Image (cartoon, helix red, strand yellow):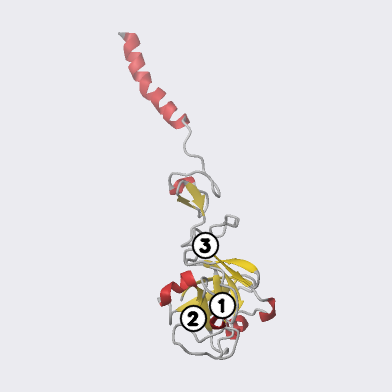
Amino acid sequence: MKYLVALLLALPIVISIALFSSPSHAISSCNGPCHTLDDCTGQLICVNGRCHDDPDVGTHTCPSTPSPSGGGCQPSGTMNCHGKSFPRYRCSPPATSSTRATLTNNDFSEGGDGGGPSECDDGYHKNSELIVALSTGWYAGGSRCGSRIRITSTKTGRSAIAKVVDECDSMNGCDGEHAYQPPCKNNIVDGSNAVWHALGLDIEVGEEDVTWSMA
């Protein structure tokens, strides 16, 4: 009887030791396994069982790795232009509070390298205006026409607010309407001269890394 009482008294201690000594989910860094937000270090979040940067916070803790899917966006075929094959996209990477993009330069004036008039208003614009064209997926069938976006240069840290007036067509190109240029990539913010100047960037460079969000 004494042995049974002693065993019953010791049982909670054994259980407590077992619970506290049993391994819990390890704290995970970038791309590490996770089950809850507490499993990820810093400001990382648990998505589909892996720790990732939080797009709503805009952290860039995890190193960027090129993805053939273009941020989950698969090509919709290819187009042959100037003897080269270019992917065509109906979609763009998801738009977040700090969407990574490539800034290019566009001439929105009549006769400029932008080709035909802007899609949003069927008109031409002065390059002194703070205006942009967005890749097909971000243009979203014109739903962002007239909206203003905040663009921030990764290089200079400067920001500018520009109005969406056109589509940077990721599906079509190599014709007069598109100034015989190939389809846009699916992550393009095509800015006027004024946008480049406001960001403190050199137009002659051609492409610069930026982030954008709705203003």
Work out whether mark 3 precedes mark 1 in sequence or the reverse, and give the earlier one: 3
- Residue 196: name its quadrant: bottom right
Q: CA distance from mark 3 to mark 1?
A: 20 Å
Discs 3/1, front: 3
Q: CA distance from mark 1 to mark 2?
A: 9 Å
Q: Residue furthest right?
A: 204
Q: Residues within 10 Å of mark 1 (few under 14, many from 20)?
A: many
Discs 2/3, front: 3
Amino acid marked by disc 3: Pro
Amino acid marked by disc 1: Asp
- Spot occupied by residue 57 in the image (x, y as percentages of width and height): 48, 62
Determine contact: label 3, label 1, CB under 8 Å.
Answer: no
Residue wearing tag 2: 166
Q: CA distance from mark 2 to mark 3?
A: 21 Å
Q: Residues within 10 Å of mark 2 (few under 14, many from 20)?
A: many
Work out whether mark 1 precedes mark 2 in sequence or the reverse, and give the earlier one: 2
